[in-house]
Image: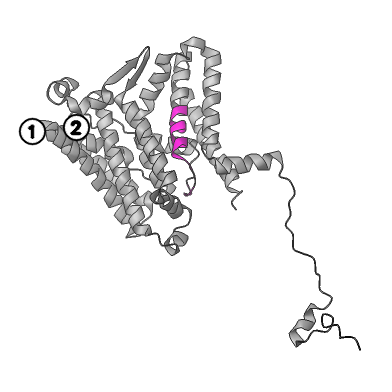
């Protein structure tokens, strides 16, 4: 007598539901992506690509219109000089935005730090080097307060930094008595304050130390954000703070560290600002907060946090510089610059929303 077919006759009661069930192996849909979907995925994986493309097209367009008048070593390095301060402040803004926050006080912190450096030198007679350190400390302290209020008191970054902007701005004018320290006095008694205004000349190209500092800072932060655990934590906190916390990241500590570092970088921008304008003025750099946000948004860094490249911020700042110089050389009304930059901001946010659908 042959053996019974056990496969056809389940030995357990619960196995009877498997009789006559499908035996096909599960498979996934492997249809080819359309060219538009491929572009969407590429831009999602390379967030700095869009601002880089816009920058190249802008250079090509103004170069074709203006020719050698625009494409000269002097003009190209002039753009770098014009965006050096925005690039440094934009680096501070980038760190905050990557954590899904925003810092409206970056410009005020920058100016207050520069005022402290000047006043400590000329009002209190401190050595200029020590005054610079005090200015850097003030910037870091302002950032630390922002970070503590956001991380430990759970206040919205927009409200915290809006309030800090007003407080620091008022403190700046009250402390300085709206007094400007002249460039001649700084040059004669504290030339180190103007350090970032010094320049290197290579042919017709002129590179200030402020430009070099901006490039080195962006390069350093790019490496930290992309090749260190701390950088991965920054992205993780911005993408999903709860998931980051479950993964072992100290979210509160990271937020405080990011805002403190942002304040320190703003103080560095304040030092560079003195070199850029030559003097210490409490009214300088009033729009640095808006300009930094503009560079970040046009640079493809998501305002929702967790996605973007600091290189994109640099490209965004350069795009603004290219449009400003190009339109000025063309002799157009300056308002056209604001109009085009406004359109670029809206377009950049729309593209970011479209790209984010890949991860949805």
Residue 355, position as x, y percentages in the image: 59, 44
The quarter of the picture where residue 21 lies is: bottom right
Judging by the rendered image, the residue that carries numbered circle 2 is: 178
Q: Secondary structure at mark 1?
A: loop
Q: Residue 241: give x, y in percent of width and height.
A: 44, 58
Vertical arrangement, residue 81 with respect to residue 316, above or below:
above
Q: Is 308 on the left-hand or right-hand side of 182?
A: right
Q: Nearer the viewer, residue 286 or 263?
A: 263
All told, the count of numbered labels is 2
* Residue at point 22%, 25% (across, down): 194
Residue 115 percent across, percent down from the top left: 20, 34
Given the current orientation, which residue lies at the most extreme front position?
1
Q: Is residue 304 magenta?
A: yes
Q: Name the image colouring.
A: one colour
Q: Identify residue for label 1.
A: 125
Classify the position of the N terminus by image quarter: bottom right
- Residue drawn 75% across the image and 49% down it: 31
What's the CA distance linking mark 1 and mark 2? 19 Å
């Amino acid at each position: 007598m042959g053996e019974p077919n056990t496969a056809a006759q389940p030995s357990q009661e619960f196995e009877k539901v498997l009789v006559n069930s499908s035996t096909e192996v599960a498979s996934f849909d492997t249809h080819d992506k359309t060219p538009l979907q491929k572009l969407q995925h590429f831009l999602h994986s390379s967030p700095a690509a869009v601002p880089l493309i816009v920058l190249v097209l802008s250079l090509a367009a103004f170069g074709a219109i203006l020719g050698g008048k625009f494409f000269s070593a002097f003009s190209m390095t002039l753009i770098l000089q014009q965006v050096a301060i925005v690039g440094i402040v934009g680096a501070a803004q980038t760190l905050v935005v990557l954590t899904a926050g925003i810092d409206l006080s970056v410009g005020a912190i920058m100016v207050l730090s520069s005022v402290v450096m000047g006043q400590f030198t000329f009002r209190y007679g401190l050595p200029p080097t020590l005054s610079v350190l005090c200015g850097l400390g003030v910037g870091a302290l302002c950032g630390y307060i922002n970070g503590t209020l956001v991380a430990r008191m759970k206040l919205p970054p927009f409200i915290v930094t809006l309030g800090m902007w007003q407080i620091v701005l008022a403190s700046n004018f009250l402390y300085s008595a709206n007094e400007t320290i002249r460039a001649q006095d700084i040059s004669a008694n504290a030339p180190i304050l103007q350090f970032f205004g010094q320049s290197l000349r290579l042919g017709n190209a002129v590179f200030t130390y402020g430009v070099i500092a901006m490039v080195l800072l962006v390069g350093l932060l790019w490496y930290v954000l992309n090749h260190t655990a701390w950088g991965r934590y920054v992205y993780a906190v911005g993408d999903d703070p709860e998931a980051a916390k479950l993964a072992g990241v100290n979210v509160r500590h990271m937020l405080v560290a990011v805002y403190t570092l942002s304040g320190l970088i703003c103080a560095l921008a304040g030092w560079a600002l003195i070199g850029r304008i030559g003097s210490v003025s409490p009214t300088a750099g009033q729009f640095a907060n808006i300009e930094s946000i503009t560079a970040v948004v046009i640079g493809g860094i998501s305002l929702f946090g967790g996605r973007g490249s600091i290189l994109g911020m640099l490209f965004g700042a350069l795009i603004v510089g290219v449009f400003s110089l190009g339109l000025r050389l063309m002799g157009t009304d300056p308002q056209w610059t604001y109009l085009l930059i406004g359109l670029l901001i809206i377009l950049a946010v729309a593209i970011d929303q479209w790209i984010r659908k890949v991860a949805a």
